[in-house]
Amino acid sequence: AYGRGFANNKVTLLNGYGRFVDGNTIEVDGEHYTADHILIATGGAPTIPNIPGAEYGIDSDGFFALREQPKRVAVVGAGYIAVEVAGVLHALGSETHLLVRKHAPLRNFDPILVDALVEAMANEGPTLHTHSVPKAVVKNADNSLTLSLENGESITVDCLIWAIGRSPATGNIGLENTEVQLDSKGYVITDEQQNTTHKGIYCVGDIMAGGVELTPVAVKAGRLLSERLFSGMTDAKMDYSLIPTVVFSHPPIGTMGLTEPEARTHYGDDNVKVYTSTFTSMYTAVTAHRQACKMKLVCAG
């Protein structure tokens, strides 16, 4: 589909490994290509913990490559991918364990959402293990895996999935041959218009320092950058302040804007009003199992 789109828009697609030779030149499999504008959008790659036996686990790509449904699964992580994958496997009938480092998954979300998710997991699964930090993985004679934790506990499963985050794919692409600056974690530093610290080189997506790691956000930022560079919209820039997001968890989560704690910090307690409601969604209104729906509206002023 992408190939057809490129062809229809007269975009030349080069299949190969690219790296910067200098600020205006990219080398792809020995061939050099120069441009006045170069966009870095290499995305991220799953992070694997540096512990003994970590190689026995798989990442989110490996999850989609599974040929059989595992009977027992441990998912390690507290973000979107971990929560979604654990929810899918549990709903399909696998004995599923979700392990998080701290008190709950999705800790950056509003407390009402976190509490509702934790409550649903306690009542319906998957099994949530809080304050659980992996220490080592051992492969047993029957090909099962035993995951040892720093708290002394252990879990034996048939499949171990690492979902502890993603790292920016900025290594080995020749950025040292440019003036592009990275932060301490390897993310590309940009201004509000996607400019890097090297004139003519831009960045969007998961590798941008301080960005929002969501595909639609990168697509929108790329479109606005194109409008600015080629359509004369010199002030075009991405607004990262109010971005809606959804987590395909069980139950699903949708949110936009500041959380209640963030709003109180930003505007002050006296300038924030909060409205909450709990009800049964129409989706489960006539079923034997009625799932509670919780809503919060945070108002400033």
Image (cartoon, rainbow, N blue to C red):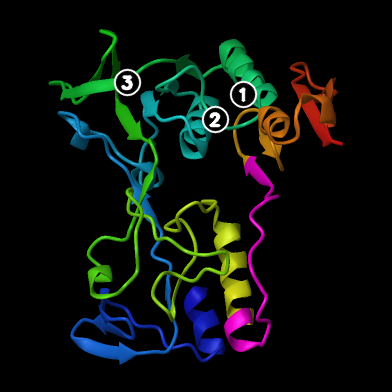
- 271 on left or right of 203: right
Residue 62: image x %, image y %? 33, 44
Which residue bears the numbered disc 3? Answer: 133
Q: Which residue in the structure is indicated by mark 2?
A: 106
Left or right placement of residue 239 versus residue 166 in this view = right
The residue carrying pointer 3 sits among few (fewer than 14), some (14 to 19) or many (20 or more) residues within 10 Å by Cα, namely many
* Upstream in sequence: badge 1 or badge 3: 1
Label 3 element class: loop
Residue 135 in the image, given as x and y percentages of width and height? 22, 21
In the image as oriented, which residue stretches furthest toward the left?
A: 141
Residue at left 63%, top 64%? 238
- Label 1 vs label 2: CA separation? 6 Å
Residue found at the very far top of the displayed protein: 152
Q: The residue tagged with tag 1: helix, strand or loop?
A: helix
The answer to whether residue 12 is above or below residue 154 is: below
Disc 1 residue type?
Val
| Magenta residue check for 234 | yes
Q: Position of residue 247 (x, y in %)?
A: 61, 39
Q: From mark 3 to mark 2, how far is it between C-alphas?
A: 16 Å
> Which of the 4 image quadrants contains residue 31?
bottom left
Q: Tell which of 180 and 81 is nearer to you.
A: 180
The secondary structure that most of the magenta stretch takes on is loop
- Report which quarter residue 24 is drawn in: bottom left
Whether residue 145 is visible to the viewer of this picture, yes or no, is: no
Q: Badge 2: few (under 14), some or many (20 or more) residues near its Cα, within 10 Å?
A: many
Pointer 1 residue: 114
* 97 and 39: which is toward the camera: 39
CB atoms of marks 1 and 2 within 8 Å = yes
Q: Which residues are magenta?
A: 228-246
Q: Is residue 14 left or right of residue 81?
A: left
